[in-house]
Image (tube, rainbow, N blue to C red):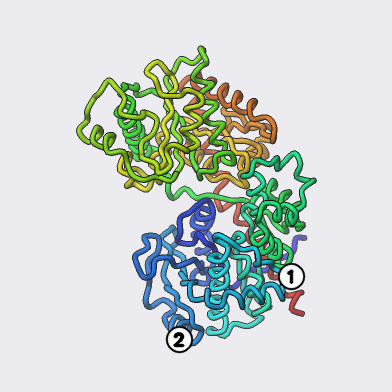
Amino acid sequence: MSKKLLTPDYIFESSWEVCNKVGGIYTVLSTRAKTLQEKFGDNLIFIGPDFWNGDVNPLFKENKTLFSGWKKHAETVDGLKVRIGRWQVPGLPVAVLVDFHPFFAKKNEIYTWAWNNYHVDSLHAYGDYDEASMFSYSAAKVVESYYKYFGLTGKDKVVYQAHEWMTALGALYLQKAIPSIATIFTTHATSIGRSIAGNNKPLYDHLTDYNGDQMAAELNMQSKHSVEKSAAQNVDCFTTVSDITARECKQLLEKEPDVVLVNGFERDFVPTLGDKFDKARKKARKRVLDVANALLGAKLSDDTLLISVGGRYEYKNKGIDLFVDAMNRLRHDSRLEKEILALVLVPAWMKEARTDLVECIKHKKNSSHPIGDPRITHVLNNQDSDNVLNQMNWLDMFNRPEDKVKLIFVPCYLDGKDGVFNLHYYDMLIGMDLCIYPSYYEPWGYTPTESVAFHVPCITTDLAGFGLWANKVKGGTSELEDGVKTIHRSDSNATEVSEDIKNTVLHFSRMDHTSVEQARKNASKLAEKALWKHFIKYYYEAYDVALRNAKQRTK
């Protein structure tokens, strides 16, 4: 007989990405919010940083009457500067944005406390460490203020979940300040693991040989690693997001996660199948081809295969280098019959939309010659040193008329107002035929999750949490006909991965309409298995572990 899980009465979650759209953690929290909000109502409270100094944040709507008594107390008695309202995502959960800047005056005192209590090494801090730590501390003070103002006690089951090293310090503070609060720390990617991978060191073949503390010193990551490791080893429940990252945590943080919180998704952003979906897909394809034809001085046909890679501009970690290499290999393959338009949808240090391209699109000029550099849609601040363009230069990829594969770099945030496409990322994604995410370091991988949710088959690797999960669902290696092709990747097989991507795209280009539609349906079916309603159970397991350990700890 299974035990009855302890369920929280209150849940507080802090993250740098609450009402702050930066990366994958925003997707985790914002898509999961509705599922938890339906259960816990306004006892679910998200805490994020307030960068806006009273200005409008489109992701947050302030509510002057919500918890107004506590807000006044927090400001006048506890010295906190907060705005309370609702996060503008499905479920409209309560969000508290806190101005962390006043705590810089107490920085040395806070770091001394962290060292004395947990041996957190803040001595080697640089870059964003101070900013993140002050936010982390202020978020914990918000919870402390709420707890005391509303007279909560040990009888109230309260959980505080901190996401990533940026909020680790706050979890440690609360464990001392209010011991009855059950603490959860979730690392979505270890800071030292990401650094090892980002510095072109072989992470996986030699994982068991690495010592986290030693590597942190070598890579000048001592402070971030220190606070992350301290949180992992001291909170009531330590969690991560995939089995592959769990192995990384065990080795580098010397703590095996108590629970793996697999990342889910919701389909609130996906149009329902039928006219609405078809119109959105048709609109996206037309816009992409119109821009490409204007830029290239070409007349790509409506059945051109649209392929993309997306995500953060982590050139090796996200496999952008292998995407470009695979497209170059495909360009030279005489077996390719279809025209392919490959897009690198990765925000870079972008200056502005190209005025010549904007004018050409605006006036619908049908030139038979390319406009300027036919490989990029926006002006970069560092165009001469950009990785994508330099790799294309090296491979002699210049989108010549005779090339069956054209590759275009779209280095902007697709927020609907980039000046060229003027579409949101999801509104572009729905028009793709195939997406490719050949990740090297990807604890989970929301880009392939989003892809299959929009009925777009994709290619990923077994170094991504999502790729491993797709294999587990399949009961073997997932193939493109299943909706996801999972390619084996290691520290030393980049050439084989590029070749495998090329051959998979070539195979896809030859599939008949019925086979393609079946692959799209299977992608959607896989996405259904990744909905939060299936994965939320792991969070309830983590809450139970945290509450039981907190109870034991405070006896």
Amino acid type indicated by mark 2:
Thr
Number of marks present in the image shown = 2
Q: Residue at x 47, y 85 (%)?
A: 73
Secondary structure of the residue carrying tag 1 is: helix
Amino acid type indicated by mark 1:
Asn
Q: Is residue 178 above or below residue 222?
A: below
Residue furthest to the right:
209
Q: Where, quadrant-wise, is the C terminus in this rendering?
A: bottom right
| Residue 513 placement (x, y as % from top left) | 45, 22
| Pick the front one: 511 or 241 | 241
Report the mark closest to the observer, 2 or 1.
2
Q: Residue at x 24, y 32 (%)?
A: 360
Q: Is residue 465 visible?
A: no
* 473 left or right of 275 in image: right
Q: Residue at x 43, y 58 (%)?
A: 89
**Distance (Cα) linking label 2 and label 1:** 34 Å
Q: Is residue 310 visible?
A: yes
Q: Which residue is mark 1?
A: 549
